[in-house]
Image (cartoon, rainbow, N blue to C red):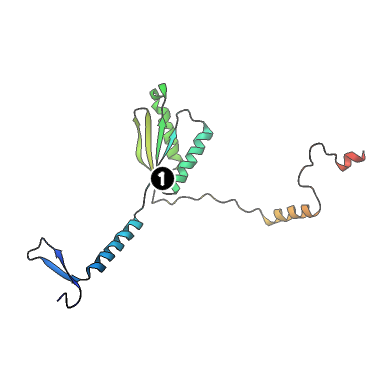
Amino acid sequence: MARELELDLVEVADKANPPVCRIMDYGKYKYEAAQRQKESKKKASNVVVKEMKYRPKISGGDFDTKTRKVEKFLQEGHKVKITIMFRGREVTHPQLGRKILDNIAERVEEYAKVEAYPRLDGRNMTMVLGPDSKKKPKRKPERPAPPADVVKQGVAAADNGAATTPPPVGAVSDEAAKS
């Protein structure tokens, strides 16, 4: 019957008694199965774990810079592993590292959740943050355009020949030259 239809006889369930067979185009079946597999791989999200390292004696500016980078990673949908590296006797003060990790968690709580709470591993204290799918990342507001009347005043001043830049150093102004 399969030969008459120019199809294949495929055994579907070999464990059954008697075996279950089906008449189908096997090449087409394999192709469609491969397409379904490929489609499911596209839909699978590839989560990358980024790592940011801090020190207990980090300065405020460095802390802000690194934390902004952590925020960017989380908004892109990556997990972030935060490591506090202790050197020498710093390891005797784990509360300093814990304080830094708490500050980071507090700063990103709007769009991230703590997946692994801080713990001390040898000379490093680690914490893992993940993007919170329930909370949408809040975009930074863009700079509003200056009001139209301010722009017009600037254009009017430029049209009147008013200098908008200071004269070069050592240049003599018109008023100074007259006196």
SS type, badge 1: strand
Image location of residue 28, percent across then percent down: 26, 68
Residue extending farthest bottom:
4
Q: Badge 1: few (under 14), some or many (20 or more) residues near its Cα, within 10 Å?
A: many
Image location of residue 21, percent across then percent down: 14, 68
Question: What residue appears at the point 22 percent right and 68 percent down from the top-left corner?
Answer: 26
Q: Is residue 10 left or right of residue 131?
A: left
Q: Is residue 160 left or right of residue 27?
A: right
Image location of residue 138, percent across then percent down: 48, 50
Which residue in the protein does label 1 denote? 112
Along the line of sight, which residue is nearer the eye, 170 or 159? 170
Along the line of sight, which residue is nearer the eye, 170 or 115? 170
Is 138 situated above or below 59? Answer: below
Is 154 situated above or below 90? Answer: below
- Residue 120 sits in quarter: top left
Along the line of sight, which residue is nearer the eye, 33 or 25? 25
